[in-house]
Image: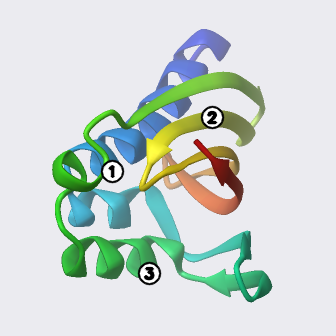
Amino acid sequence: MSNNDEKAAIAATIQTYIDAIKHSQPDRMIEVFHPHATISRERPDGFAISSNPGETIAAYMRSARPTSETSPNFSGEVISIDQTHDIASAWIIERQLEGKNFDTFFLLHKIDGRWVITSKATQGVAA
């Protein structure tokens, strides 16, 4: 696969993440994350690092009202993708998600021919 094809495949993984939020599709969220992935973020009670964000985010999505109701103006934009061999990074901006904007950085690995998110770091600010 050419470098452009790899970047397109990485972008497709990130777009699946964005679309899963936008269309309230928790099962699609699970498919983009490796089961041993981590997430780091600032929370109201302090900085947190946890594992298996795909399942955690999906569980939250199942318990919450649809994004179309809570965040009708939500959008996600890929700012950059860097890739070498079977490892990549991506930076996205998520806007108007439950009253916040987020800068989110991902690390991805190509495992068994498929790009998956292995780490997510995110920080939200009031929209």
Q: In this view, does 90 lie to the left or right of 74?
A: right
Q: Is residue 121 left or right of residue 9?
A: right
Q: Callout 3 environment at 10 Å: few (<14), some (14 to 19), or many (20+)?
A: some
Look at mark 1 in the image and give the residue it sits on. 21
Q: Looking at the image, which residue is at 71% across and 42% down?
A: 86
Identify the image quadrant of residue 103.
top right
Q: Looking at the image, which residue is at 35% across and 67% down?
A: 30
Q: Are marks 1 and 2 in contact (CB under 8 Å)?
A: no
Q: In which quarter of the image is the N terminus?
A: top right
Q: Distance between the residues labelled 3 and 1?
A: 13 Å
- Badge 3 amino acid: Thr
Instruction: Please state which of residues 23 and 72 is positioned toward the viewer in this rendering.
Output: 72
Identify the image quadrant of residue 98.
bottom left
What label sits on residue 92 in the rendered view?
A: 2
Disc on the earlier residue, 3 or 2: 3
Instruction: Please state which of residues 77 and 87 is positioned toward the viewer in this rendering.
Output: 77
Q: Callout 1 environment at 10 Å: few (<14), some (14 to 19), or many (20+)?
A: many
Q: Callout 2 environment at 10 Å: few (<14), some (14 to 19), or many (20+)?
A: many
Q: Is residue 29 left or right of residue 37?
A: left
Look at mark 3 in the image and give the residue it sits on. 56
Q: Do the residues labelled 3 and 2 touch (CB within 8 Å)?
A: no
The vertical placement of 46 against 23, above or below, is: below
Disc on the earlier residue, 1 or 2: 1
- Badge 1 amino acid: Ile
Q: List x then y, in percent, for residue 44.
A: 70, 80
What label sits on residue 39 in the rendered view?
A: none
SS assignment at label 3: helix
Q: Looking at the image, which residue is at 54% across and 39% down?
A: 94
Q: How far apart are marks 3 and 2 (CA)?
A: 20 Å
